[in-house]
Image (spheres, helix red, strand yellow):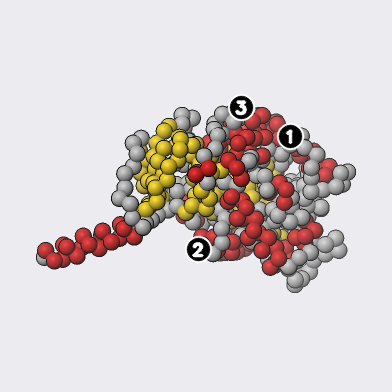
Amino acid sequence: MKAVATLFFAIIATSLLAQKSIVINNVRIFNGKDEKVTSGNLLIVDNLISKISSSPIAVIPNENTEIIDGKGAFLMPGLIDAHTHIMMESLTIMELLNNDIEFITVNAVKAAEKDLMQGFTTFRDLSGPAFGLQKAIDRGLMVGPRIYPSGAMISQTAGHGDFLSVNAVPRDASAHLDFTERFNFGILADGPDEVLKRTREQLRLGATQIKLAAGGGVSSNYDPLDVSEYTEAEMKAAVDAAENWGTYVTVHAYTPRAIQTALRAGVRCIDHAQLIDEATAKMVAEKKTWLSLQPFVDEGESAFPEGSPNRIKQQTMMKGTEVAYGLAKKLGIKTAFGTDCLFQPKHAASRATNLTKLLKWYTPYEILKMATSTNAELLAMSGPRNPYPKKLGVIEEGAYADLLVVKGDPMKEIQVLENYENNFVLIMKDGKIYKNKLSQL
């Protein structure tokens, strides 16, 4: 019996020694939720935060333990972007439509690594074939953020996801799928039955949530900005299918009518909403639906030529940004942060500038909370389809070890996040260090 007990404890000891441990002592911690920053120390075991202490954490040095002096720097959760398109962010529209999927994928692989090095450790991807990238990142084959993929955005004919050629209609039922459909950037579906089928296909592929195009868009050519797309019955078909899988539907929508139709159908998140009015915003608040807003402001740069129909739609949409944020704050609507980096490599290479744009409506603390713990709440709505079931967006025991150590104090000057190359001195995701320049402090 004694021999059995000795063997048992030997196995336990060997197991503990095999665990990878990282201690970060002497940091000022923003936990993702509270405005107060506290001095503390962290123990990370494998990919989780195991202990947070106000006293230095003593460990027995061994080959599986790393001890880091944080030198009093600012530590925070990794940033979360709730509206991304990883497969489309680093190429122009013309490049995407006129290149093969292999070239597009290689660009996305490089983009994902750059995104992580900007401090973004998690993405909610809302259109595009990101399933393979997600799997490759999770298996350690490439470097990038965690991805909550929607797969193809589902759209009606003449909707925001219709990128067929001008002469592609009338479309025969036996017609081949377009390039964008074959490779799951977007898929057309008309009528409740087709919407139901296409939703189930994305769930089959591994979608964590479903994305529908519910109204006119900027980059699409056939739908004016003011149109409402999909009937309530069509949206309800997607909602029913998603709820059967324990997850939810989000919609691309700008206008009151599009948003109201989505709300009646049971949609739980509205992405964009720049043209929302107060009556519709009150409906959003009453139903406790999320708004996933982006700080779209006209700074003179665009993926579309000046004077073009797409650029005019973009400028019209941007005029509503201030009203949308104002209503969200006034009515206490749960609001997520997203960048919607799309078709503009320069925009994707400076994601944090979107955070500083929010200073017009929020304090630095409110912005940081939105881009960490609040966004994580939205991600968790995918329920059993959540591929990362531990806590994200927070510094607390048991949460994923996704964290940043920052030179400067973003709670006082959030602009320090823009200069990520110099000011992010440590980047960790899932307990693995991807950058450590603390020695330079």
Q: Can you give x and y, in whole percent of width and height, for residue 441 in the image?
A: 52, 39
Q: Residue at x 65, y 55 (%)?
A: 111
Front in this rendered view, residue 58 or 254: 58
Work out whether 416 lies above or below 8. above
Q: Residue at x 68, y 38 (%)?
A: 295
Work out whether 26 lies above or below 19. above
Front in this rendered view, residue 184 or 19: 19
Quarter where residue 408 is shown: top right
Q: Where does label 1 land, which residue?
A: 320
Report the mark closest to the observer, 2 or 3: 2
Judged from this view, the residue extending furthest toward the left is 1
Label 2 to label 3, Cα distance in Å? 43 Å
Work out whether 428 lies above or below 366. below
Q: Residues within 10 Å of mark 1 (few under 14, many from 20)?
A: some
- The numbered mark, 2 or 1, whose residue comes first in the sequence reads 2
Q: Quadrant of the N terminus?
A: bottom left
The amino acid type of the residue labelled 2 equals Arg
Label 2: state its secondary structure: loop
- The numbered mark, 2 or 3, whose residue comes first in the sequence reads 2
Q: Where does label 3 land, which residue?
A: 330
Q: Marks 3 and 2: in contact by CB < 8 Å?
A: no
Numbered tag placed on residue 126 in the rendering:
none
Label 3 to label 1, Cα distance in Å? 15 Å
Q: Where does label 2 land, which residue?
A: 139
Judged from this view, the residue extending furthest toward the top is 330
Q: Can you give x and y, in whole percent of width and height, for residue 269 in the image?
A: 60, 44
Label 2 to label 1, Cα distance in Å? 41 Å
**Res 268 visible:** no
Q: Can you give x and y, in whole percent of width and height, for residue 389 in the image?
A: 45, 52
44 relative position to 383: left or right: left
Q: Can you give x and y, in whole percent of width and height, for residue 327 in the image?
A: 65, 30
